[in-house]
Image (cartoon, rainbow, N blue to C red):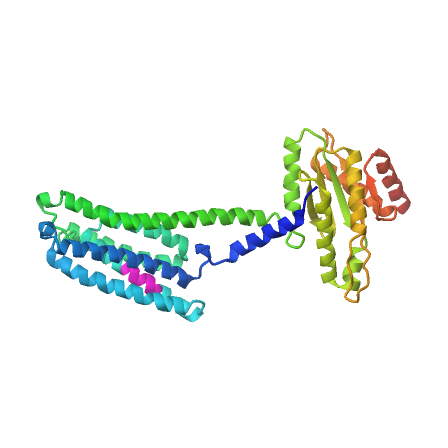
């Protein structure tokens, strides 16, 4: 039998729900919190630039390969961009949840970040490996994190700027890669290659790591959402969709007999009408707990709709299925549900049992269990009835009498 199966399913649902709303999932962060992440990334990039600037300034042997005046200017510019990006982190943190601020601050924060990168791309070369990798990586991460309107409002002007600089460099109106001396042999040297690699690695590593985290969380969340879509939110049992999928799998894979048991709570509408829907919900939850406790690990219990439940008993004979159904019927009779005034609410259920056959499709078997359930109700309720050929005859006779 399942040991506290319903409790486990409840714990699973609680875990899934918590995961879907908790802030640790980056894609669930608010827009300003995402801006903080990108601003921190921008600060890291400019810190690496500052380290490179200081290193070159302190190593005169490399001055032949660079425009040393521009390196000094770059040191000041990177410091200013770093300060600006760092300062913007505070209002992004302070005004999280403020709709008015969220309408413009992300454009300012991401705009400054993109502007700083565009300038860096120009001074190292528009089509340099650094610029191309930074463009692709940050565009990919941006599209995952932010809405398209924000991303494209930054992407379009940045692309126009970079494209214009590239064209003007091509026609000789602007120097290409003004930071480096790229004439003759100076362009093809170890210092330039190592510098390119130095600029590339932090951007590539951080973006790849961030993208991997986002992708992993997305995949995990999709699996959890899929799992949650299979669970009835009230009883934490499998829902009708899950049961139908289970029946389809049994149709294609099961070589052994299995049984379907449909059960319907007797006069459940009266519980809702006389005692309130909250007592009806309490009854459904307690019934689901009882059913879960009566079954084996290999069996499946689900809420088929309203006050109707279904049991899928694998590797079962008709006799065994009848015994399980009877055990469940008696257990439901013992459920203790009290009204708000302390009055005991009587809870009973009627059961219909059907056993699989090689020539029967699952939906046909489900129809047979439903007929057996109907017969159990017609015979006075709180009974277990199994489908057979004689039951079909009884149902036809009852129909003729009714007509």
Considering every residue shown, the one lying at the far right of the view is 401
Res 262 visible:
yes
Position of residue 234 measured from the top left corner of the image (x, y, whole percent): 66, 55
Q: Quadrant of residue 51?
A: bottom left
Position of residue 79 measured from the top left corner of the image (x, y, whole percent): 22, 63
Position of residue 121 measured from the top left corner of the image (x, y, whole percent): 23, 54
Left-right relation of 208 to 164: right
Considering every residue shown, the one lying at the far front of the view is 3
Residue range of the region highlighted in magenta in the rendering? 107-115
Residue sitting nearer the eye, 168 or 18? 18
Taking the magenta stretch, the answer to whether it contains residue 250 is: no
Res 164 visible:
no
The answer to whether 77 is drawn above or below residue 328 in the figure is: below
Residue sitting nearer the eye, 130 or 24? 24
Query: Which is the main secondary structure of the residues drawn in magenta?
Result: helix
Left-right relation of 64 to 202: left
Taking the magenta stretch, the answer to whether it contains residue 113 is: yes
Q: Quadrant of the N terminus?
A: top right
């Amino acid at each position: 039998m399942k040991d506290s199966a319903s409790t486990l399913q409840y714990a699973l649902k609680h875990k899934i729900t918590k995961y879907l709303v908790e802030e640790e999932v980056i894609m669930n962060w608010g827009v300003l919190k995402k801006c903080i992440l990108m601003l921190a990334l921008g600060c890291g990039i400019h810190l690496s630039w500052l380290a490179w600037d200081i290193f070159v300034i302190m190593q005169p042997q490399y001055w032949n390969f660079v425009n040393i005046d521009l390196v000094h200017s770059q040191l000041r510019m990177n410091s200013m961009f770093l300060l600006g990006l760092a300062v913007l982190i505070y209002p992004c943190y302070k005004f999280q949840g403020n709709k008015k601020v969220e309408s413009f601050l992300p454009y300012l924060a991401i705009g400054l970040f993109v502007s700083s990168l565009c300038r860096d791309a120009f001074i190292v070369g528009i089509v340099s490996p650094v610029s191309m990798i930074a463009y692709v990586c940050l565009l990919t991460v941006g599209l995952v994190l932010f809405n398209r309107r924000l991303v494209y409002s930054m992407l379009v002007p940045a692309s126009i700027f970079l494209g214009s600089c590239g064209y003007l460099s091509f026609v000789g109106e602007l120097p290409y890669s003004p930071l480096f001396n790229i004439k003759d042999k100076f362009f093809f040297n170890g210092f330039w290659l190592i510098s390119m690699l130095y600029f590339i690695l932090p951007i590539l590593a951080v973006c790849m790591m961030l993208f991997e985290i986002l992708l992993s969380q997305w995949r995990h969340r999709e699996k959890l959402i899929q799992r949650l879509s299979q669970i009835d939110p009230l009883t934490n049992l499998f829902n009708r969709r899950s049961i139908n999928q289970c029946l389809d799998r049994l149709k294609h894979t099961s070589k052994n007999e299995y049984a379907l048991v449909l059960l319907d709570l007797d006069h459940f509408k009266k519980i809702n009408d006389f005692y309130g829907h909250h007592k009806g919900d309490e009854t459904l939850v307690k019934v689901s707990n009882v059913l879960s406790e009566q079954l084996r690990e290999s069996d499946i219990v689900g809420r088929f709709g309203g006050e109707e439940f279904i049991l899928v008993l694998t590797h079962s004979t008709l006799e065994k299925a009848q015994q399980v159904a009877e055990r469940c019927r008696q257990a439901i009779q013992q459920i203790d549900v009290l009204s708000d005034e302390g009055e005991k609410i009587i809870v009973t259920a009627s059961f219909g049992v059907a056993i699989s056959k090689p020539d029967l499709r699952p939906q046909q078997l489900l129809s047979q269990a439903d007929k057996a359930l109907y017969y159990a109700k017609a015979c006075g309720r709180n009974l277990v009835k199994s489908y057979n050929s004689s039951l079909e005859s009884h149902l036809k006779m009852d129909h003729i009498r009714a007509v």
